[in-house]
Image (cartoon, grey):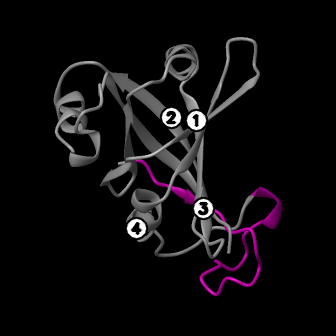
Amino acid sequence: MAELEYACVSEAHPERVEGSTPSRGTRVKNMTLLEYKNLIEENPIAFATITEDNKPNVIGTAFAKIVSENEILLTDNYMSQTIIDILQNNNVCLTVWDKNLKGVKIIGTAEYFTTGKWKNFVENIIENKGLPAKGAILIEVSQIIPSK
C-alpha cells in the first residue's frame, strides 16, 4: 500500500510533525481517509479532472464510498467529459465540505471500470437505484488536505 501524504492548511494542528516544511505541506500523524468517511459519504463533492488541453473540468457528484483507507469509489451515472479526461490523464482532485465548513481536499489518481468488481459494487448500492450506473471510478488517494 502506498504511503499517503497528509497536509494541513493551518499550523494550529496539534498533529503536525515537527521539522516539516510548511511550503510543501505539513505532514500529519494518524489521519486516514476513514476519518473523513461521514463527511465524504454524506455530502456532495466537487470532482476535478484535467482536459486534454490542460483546462480544469469540475463537476458535482454524490454517492462516494470509502472502500479502503486510501481509496474512494464514485459512480458514473451521467459523466461524459470527466471520463474522457480520466482516460487521458488520471490525476484528479476532490473537495467536500459540510454546512459547518469542515472540509477536505483530496488528491489522487483515478481508474475507470465498466465491468468487474467495482462496476458491480456501484450497480448495487442503494443510492444508485433507478440510475444508470454506467461505470465506477476508483480513486487512489495520495494526499489529504483538511480545511480546518
Q: How many marks?
A: 4
- Quadrant assignment for the C terminus: bottom right
Q: Position of residue 111 (x, y in %)?
A: 41, 27
Q: Nearer the viewer, mark 4 or mark 1?
A: 4
Per the model, the C-alpha gap separating discs 2 and 4 is 21 Å
The residue that mark 2 highlights is 109
Name which residue lies at 76% across and 57% down: 24
Per the model, the C-alpha gap separating discs 4 and 3 is 12 Å
* Labels 2 and 1 touching (C-beta < 8 A): yes
The residue that mark 1 highlights is 92
Q: Position of residue 40 (x, y in %)?
A: 45, 58
Q: Label 3: state its secondary structure.
A: strand
Q: Earlier in the sequence, mark 4 or mark 3?
A: 4
Name which residue lies at 48% across and 47% down: 141
Per the model, the C-alpha gap separating discs 4 and 1 is 21 Å
Q: Residues within 10 Å of mark 2 (few under 14, many from 20)?
A: some
Q: Label 2: state its secondary structure.
A: strand
Q: Nearer the viewer, residue 36 or 32?
A: 36
Q: Quadrant of residue 88?
A: top right
Q: Label 1: state its secondary structure.
A: strand
**In the image, is 3 to the left or to the right of 100?**
left
Q: Nearer the viewer, residue 51 or 30?
A: 51
Residue span colored magenta: 2-24
The residue that mark 3 highlights is 104
Per the model, the C-alpha gap separating discs 2 and 3 is 16 Å
Q: Earlier in the sequence, mark 1 or mark 3?
A: 1
Q: Nearer the viewer, mark 2 or mark 4?
A: 4
